Amino acid sequence: MTETRPEAARLADTLDVAIERLSGARPFAKQRHQRPVLDVAARLAAVPGGLDALYARGLAMEAAGLFRGSDWDDPSRLLPQLVGQTLQSPDRLTVALEVASLLRLLAIASGGGAHVNVHAEHARHFLTQVLALNLPHFFDQTSEADRQDSAGTAMRRDVFRFIADHIGFQDVLGILVTEIWRILEQRPIQVGPVKEMITQIAIALTREDGGIGRERLGADRLVSALFGPTNECIDDPGIDAYQMRLERLDDTALRREASGFARAMHDTGLVSDYHAAFLRWVSKYRDASFAPEALGLGGTGLDSYRKFKPLVDKLISAAVHPQTPQAVHGLAMLLERGVLHSAPIAPALERQLSMTLQPAVAARIELAFGNAVPAQTRVLAGTLEVMGQPLGVGQGATPPCQSARAIAMWALNDPDFLLHLICQVGEFDSLLMHFEGKAIASGDLPAGLAAGAPIDADPVSVLLVPHLDRVYAEMGRICAPRGGDPHRWINPEFHGWWVARDCVVAVDVLTGQLDDYDGFVTRFCQGYHPAYNGGRPVIHPQPAGIAVTDASARFVGWHAISILRVAQDTEGRTRIYFYNPNNDSGQDWGGGVTVSTHGNGERHGEASLVFEQFVSRLYLFHDDLIRPAGAGAPVPAELIESIRTLAVDSWAASRIPQDLALAGAQ
Amino acid sequence: MSIDPDKGYIALLGWSLNAIDAIDRFDRKYIVVAPPWAEEYCQQNEIPYMSWDFDRLNERSHELAHRLKEEGVDVAIPLFEETVEWAGAINSVLMDNPRLLGQSMLFRDKSLMKRRAQLGGIRVGVFEEAHDRGDVIRFLKRVNQTLLKLEGDPNDPIHFKAFDKSGTAGHRVIRTPEDVDNIPDEEFPALLESHLDGWEFAVEAWIKDRKIQFLNISEYVTLGYSVFVPATPELESWRARITEEVEKLIETFDIDFGFIHPEYFLTSDGKLYFGEVAYRPPGFNALELIERAYGFNGYQGIALMFDPKATTEEIDAFFPEEVTDAKGYAGCFGVYPRRRVISRLEVPEETQNHPYFEFHELASPAEQKVTKRTAFGTHWGLAYFFGENPHKLRDLLKAQEDLDFYI
C-alpha cells in the first residue's frame, strides 16, 4: 500500500512522474512542467531521506529540462556567493530550484555524469566554495525546538551538511584557509569578516576532530594567531586570567611572550586580544625593551620607538585596548615606516591625543563600532592603522571609490594632511578644501554619492568619507559645464599638488568611443614604462581610471585606482603595482587578466598586473605636460598592438570607432 | 518521433501549448493555425505556423480552407469552442463533405444541440432559450410552479448556460431574481435548463468510423470544483448504458470521426439525462488526468481520430483497455479562495501530507482582495491527486472544498 511507505519514497515516486512529464515536453512547453517538479522537490527536500532521493535524481532533473530558461541552465556561469542568499528566498520554488541545482552539481562532482558546461572538477570547486562561504550556516547549532520554528534554516543547513558529507570537509577547510591567507596577504584594516571565518574554523576544528589532516596546519596558524599565539594564552584563558599570569612571569618568559606575539602578528596581520593586553602591560614595565619586541620592530621601527618613546607610550595607552587589538599592528607598521621622523607628524598626533570629538561625530563612530571603547579611542586606533597600512584602506560596501583612494593616498604620501583632515572633521564635523582657489566646506553641502555615511569601513573612513564625498561631488558639479572628463581638473585639486596636471583619456567622453587609442597607449608607455620614459620611477601615487571587466571580460564600470610603481617582477616581466580601494583586489577581469595580490613581488596591499594587461584596462591617467629631452623613447608597434587587442576584446568591444577598426584591419 | 509521410497532415485550430507539445511529439506532420500574436513564438521555437485571426470575418473560412488545402493539410482539429465551426467549415472543404459544416453548427449552439438530441430520442431535461432577463425569470417561476412550490418556499435552481461559451464558463446556477440581475448582457442568448438532482458526470469519447474507440467516464465530485478518472465502480457499473447513450449521440449527430465530450445526469430512478456535448478537448485538464491514469496522450488520440489516413491497427495499438488498464485514479481540484481577503498561498497541511497529493499549479496571489465567484470554472489553479482507491480519492477531493489554500 502506498499509504504506509516512507514519505520520501512516496514523494520520490511523485517526483519521477513530474520529471517524466517535464522530460517528455518539447523545449517550448517545458516551463509549465517545471513548476510541479519544483513543488514536489521542495516537499521532498524537507523530509528525512529526501535529499538522497533528490541527489539520485539530480542529473535526471537537469536532463529533463528543469533549469531550461533560467540562470541555472549554464552552471559554469553560476556564482557561489549567491547561493546562500537564494536558499533564504521566501519563494519556496526558488529555494527548490537552488537545491536541485546544487544536488545536480554534486552528482556531476561525484562523477555521476557529465555536463556540457561543467566538468567534475569545476562542480567540486564550486560546491566547496559554496560551503566555505556558508560556513556559519553550516555549523548552525540550532536545537530541535529552533528547527520547528524555522524549517527553512534547518533545510538549508541540511543541504550544506549533505553536500559536505559527499564532497569531504577537508576540501572546504582547505579552500577557506587559502582564501583567508590570500586576503590577509593584502593586510586589510578591516579584519572583521576574516576573524569571523577563523572563528568558524576554530569551531569546526573542535567538532570535526578526525579526517582533517594536512589542511589543519594552515588553519591552526590562523586560529592560534587570533586566540592563543603564545605559551601563556594558548589555552585561551581570558584577558583577566592572562594578566594575572603575567604578574608571575620572569623576564625570559616575558621575552618569549613578546616574540611569540610579534611573530604571529607579522605572519598574519592579525592581532590577538591578548597581544593588546600584553603591550599595555609591558609598556609600563620597568624594562622598556619588551614593548618594541612585542611590536616586532626592525631597525627603523626601533629607532622611531626610541626617539619618540613618550609619544608612543601615550599612543599605546590611548589607542591600544583588547577591543582595538589591530591598533598594535598599525602602530608597529607606523613606526617601521619612519613617518614619525617627518617633522609635523609627532605634534599632529599629540594634537589628536588631546582632540575632543563633536557629539555628532562621536555618535557616527559609535553607530559603526559600538561603545565598548570611547569613539575617541576608535578614531585614534583607526588613525594608527591607516598610517601604518595605507594600502589596507577599503571602501566597504559603499559605491564611492575616490574617497577611499584619497585616504590611502594621503596616508601613504601626505600623512600630515590626513591628520589635518581627521582633526578638522573630528572637531568641526566639516571639511574645508579648495578648488581652483574657491573654498568648499563640506558641512554646507548636501550628501554626496554615499547618501548615508558608511558604517562598514575603518574608523577613519567612517569619519571622513561622508565629507570627502560631498566635496568631490561639489567639484564635479563645478566642472560639469566644462565638457570633457572632469577628473582632469578634480584629481589634482582633490588629492594634491603631486598629481600630474595633464590628463589623458582613452575614450571620447561625449560618444564613449575610443579616441586615438594608440596615442593614449604610447603616451602612457612614455610616461610610466621605465624602458620608454628614460628610466624614471613613479614618484608619487598617481590616480588613474580603470575599465573594470568581469570574468567573461565584459565591461562592468569605471573604477578609481592609483598607480604606485612600475618594476620588474621575479620573472623579469615589467609589472604595474597599484592600489585598488576595493576590499579585495584579487579579481578576475577576464581574457586571462587576473589581478595578482601576492607572489609577483607585491608588497602588502598592492595589486599587480603585467604591464600590457594593466594598460589594456586603463582608460584615464595623469601625465606631465613637459618631458625632459631624451625621455619618450619610441614605443614598439607590437606592444601597442598587443595592448589594443586585449582592450578591444574586452571593455572596448563596443567602443571601436570606424577609423580604429580600419587601422586594426591594416 | 520522426514524421511518417504515409500518415495524415494535421492542422490545429487555436493556441494550446499542451496540444502543440503533444502533437509535436507525435509522428504526424502538423501546422498550428493561430492568431498573429503567436507568430514570433512559433518562429523562435520552430513550430510550424499559419497566421489566422479567428475572431473576424467568418465568411473568409473558405479562404483558410483553401490555404490549408494548398499546404497539403488532410484535416483540421478544433482545440477550442470558438474554432469548432471553423474546423467544420475547413474539413467540409478538405474532405469534400458539406455535411461537416452543418454538424459543427449544432455543436456550437446549445439550443439547437438540445433539440437535435431530443429529436433523436435522447432524454433531456426541461429547457428553453432565453434572450433577456425576463425569459429567465419566467422560466424560473414556471419550473417552480410545476414543482408545486408555494410563494416564499426556496426555489429549485435552474441552470443558465450562455449559448456559445464552453464548459463551465458562462454556466450559472439561478435561484433568485437577484441572481438573474447579476447576469451580464453579453451572456445572452442562453439556454435555460431545469435542475436535475442526480449524479453528474462527463464522458470523453474518441470516435473513428462511427465507432467508439475509447470511452472514459469522468466523475464529478462537485461540478466546477473537482473531477477524477476512471469513475468509481458504482458509476462504471453503468458503462454499458452510457456507451449506448453515446452511440445514440453518434447516430443523432451523424458523427463519423472525432472526439466528443458530453455531459450526463444519472437520476436516482436510474434514468440518464443528456446535458450537452462539445466537439473538442475538454477543459479542467481532463486529458491530463486520463494520461496520468492510462498513460496515453489524449491529444495524440484525437489526432488519430481525425486523421483520415490512420489505420485500424494503429488505433488498436494506441488505446489501452478501459478501466482495467488504468494504473490508478487521477483527480484534480480547482482551487478558489474561500476568504475575501488573502495574503498568500499555503497548501493546507492535510493536503500537503496526504499520500494522494501530487502537486499543484497554483500561483501566489497578485491581489489581496478576492472578487466574488460568479459563474463556474473560474478557479485559480488546479491541485492534482493520484491514488489507488477511488472512494478515498473522491472523499479527499470533496474535503478540499472546506480547506483554505489562500490565507
Image (tube, grey):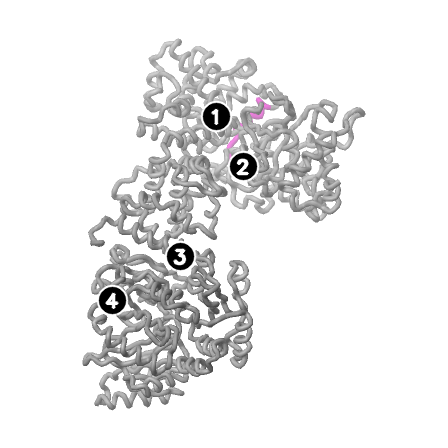
Which numbered disc covers residue A327? 1
Q: Can you say which quadrant of the picture contains the C terminus of chain A?
A: top right
Q: Position of residue A652 (x, y in %)?
A: 65, 42
Q: What range of the chain is rendered magenta?
A: A345-357
Q: Position of residue B30 (x, y in %)?
A: 48, 65
**Badge 3 is on which residue?**
A33
Task: Give the letter of the chain under mark 4.
Answer: B
Q: Position of residue B109 (x, y in %)?
A: 40, 82
**Badge 4 is on which residue?**
B398
Q: Are marks 2 and 3 in contact (CB under 8 Å)?
A: no
Q: CA distance from mark 1 to mark 3?
A: 59 Å
Q: CA distance from mark 2 to mark 3?
A: 45 Å
Q: Nearer the viewer, mark 4 or mark 1?
A: 4
- Say if A207 sits above or below B109 in the image: above
Q: Residues within 10 Å of mark 4 (few under 14, many from 20)?
A: some
**Badge 2 is on which residue?**
A395
